[in-house]
């Protein structure tokens, strides 16, 4: 039985339980593991912080409602609505960046494999059979 690796939590997420839980959830996914290798940990941290911001804004919207009354007496959309929408847009942008980066790396790897197959006659260079031994006749 394999031991699970302990996931080290970056400092910006330590005080935010929602972002910390999302970070653990993301790193369980293969796409995000690849993205962390390619784009760095900061990318996943940004996504988790946006997620936590969206969850907080949703809670505030449920508590206060989507329409608030301004001090002047006029009705206006809640500022939490803007915060939630912006967090959702940021999460979408980060997800697109993640998938495109991982896909581009996958395409480049596939192209490299195809080139290697073409150059080696269909076999990988590291899997080539050894050259035949020369037999010297006397």
Image (spheres, grey):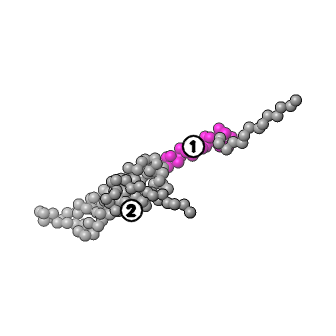
Closer to the camera in the image, 47 or 20: 20
Closer to the camera in the image, 58 or 66: 58
Whether 66 is drawn above or below 36: the answer is below
Location of residue 129 by image quarter: top right
Whether 76 is drawn above or below 93: the answer is below
- According to the image, label 2 marks what residue? 21
Please tell me which residue is depicted at 22% across the width and 66% down the height of the picture. 67
- Asked if the residues shown at circle 1 and circle 2 are in contact, with their CB atoms under 8 angstroms apart, the answer is no
Give the left or right position of residue 130, taking residue 5 as reference: right
x, y percentage for residue 133?
78, 36
Please tell me which residue is depicted at 43% across the width and 57% down the height of the picture. 7
Please tell me which residue is depicted at 23% across the width and 68% down the height of the picture. 64
Instruction: Give me the C-alpha separation between circle 1 and circle 2.
Output: 37 Å
x, y percentage for residue 127?
67, 44
Q: Quadrant of the N terminus?
A: bottom right
- According to the image, label 1 marks what residue? 111
Q: Which residues are magenta?
A: 103-124
In the rendered image, the residue lying farthest to the right is 138
Whether 104 is drawn above or below 82: the answer is above
x, y percentage for residue 60?
26, 66
**In the rendered image, is residue 135 in sight?**
yes
């Amino acid at each position: 039985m394999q031991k699970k690796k302990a996931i080290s939590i970056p400092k910006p997420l330590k005080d935010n339980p929602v972002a910390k839980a999302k970070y653990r959830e993301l790193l369980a996914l293969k796409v995000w593991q690849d993205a962390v290798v390619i784009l760095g940990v900061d990318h996943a941290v940004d996504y988790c912080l946006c997620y936590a911001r969206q969850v907080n804004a949703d809670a505030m919207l449920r508590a206060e409602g989507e329409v608030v009354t301004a001090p002047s007496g006029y009705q206006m959309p809640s500022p939490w609505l803007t915060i939630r929408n912006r967090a959702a847009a940021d999460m979408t942008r980060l997800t697109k960046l993640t998938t495109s980066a991982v896909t581009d790396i996958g395409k480049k790897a596939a192209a490299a494999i195809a080139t290697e197959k073409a150059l080696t006659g269909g076999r990988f260079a590291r899997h080539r059979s050894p050259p035949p031994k020369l037999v010297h006749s006397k």
